[in-house]
Amino acid sequence: MESPQKHKSIGVLPKAKRTKTVNQRFKKEYTEKYPVITASRIGERHAFCTVCRLDISVAHGGIHDCTKHVGSVSHRQKATIASKSNKITSFMCQGDQYDSINAEAMFTNFVTEHNLPISVTDHAGPLFRKMFPDSDISKKYMYACSRTKKTAIIEMLGEEDDGAMTKELRSRPYSLATGWLQILIVVSFCKGEGACCNVMGHF
């Protein structure tokens, strides 16, 4: 019977050398070629797509990973939607619109001061256009000056007036006269602050 040692291999095969992997890093050239690709906050092995709002890995392919992402169906669809959308800055107030805002606030004060119905503002716009045809303010003003916007302005002005009245009552003595106008005042004593008056409502 043969010895089992004869069947054993005489030598040991050498181990295969592993290839060293070199990871790519983000470069400024990526942004120069694709403006939508910028540096990522995750690290230098990633890039950030401003259209998709997505971090992509560039460790393996570098610029080829960016090319692959920009050419993907998902990116092209989002880029098409973004090109048709208005920028948020277009909805913000520009410098020449403050005159129009001032006119809206002044006319709102006029309506509330004389106790006019808010529905009057629906007819004020066409009237201002006929009265002031050469005025840029009247054109911009009557673009959106219906009762919905007037109601919002009145609510905002009311909050400002209440705040100013409360601050005035806290700072000096005042007299209270009763009559057909009933004023509800709540006096609360705060620890370490004394008495503070809050005007809760009118009518």
Image (tube, helix red, strand yellow):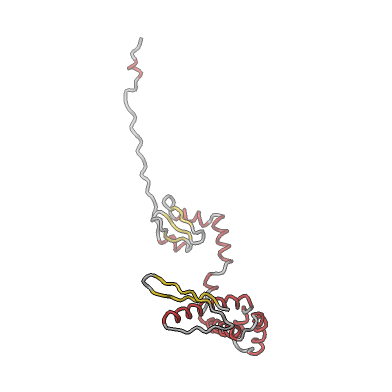
Query: How many labels, in total?
Result: 0
Residue 140 x %, y %? 60, 82
Q: Which residue does the image show at 38% across and 50% down from the upper left?
A: 23
Q: Position of residue 183 (x, y in %)?
A: 54, 79
Q: Residue 7 at x, y = what percent?
A: 36, 18
**Is 161 above or below relative to 69?**
below
Residue, x 42% and y 55% (percent of image)?
Answer: 46
Front in this rendered view, residue 86 or 133: 133
| Displayed quadrant of residue 75 | bottom right
Front-most of 2 and 50?
A: 50
- In the image shown, does 8 or 52 lie closer to the viewer? 52
Q: Residue at x 56, y 85 (%)?
A: 106
Q: Where's residue 66, x and y in %?
A: 47, 56
Instruction: Examine the rendering and report whether any part of residue 136 can be seen.
Output: no
User: Can you say which quadrant of the picture contains the N terminus?
Assistant: top left
- Quadrant of residue 13 within the rendered picture: top left
> Which residue in the rendered view is the most extreme toward the top?
1
- Tell whether 122 sits left or right of 88: right
Q: Is residue 15 left or right of residue 71?
A: left
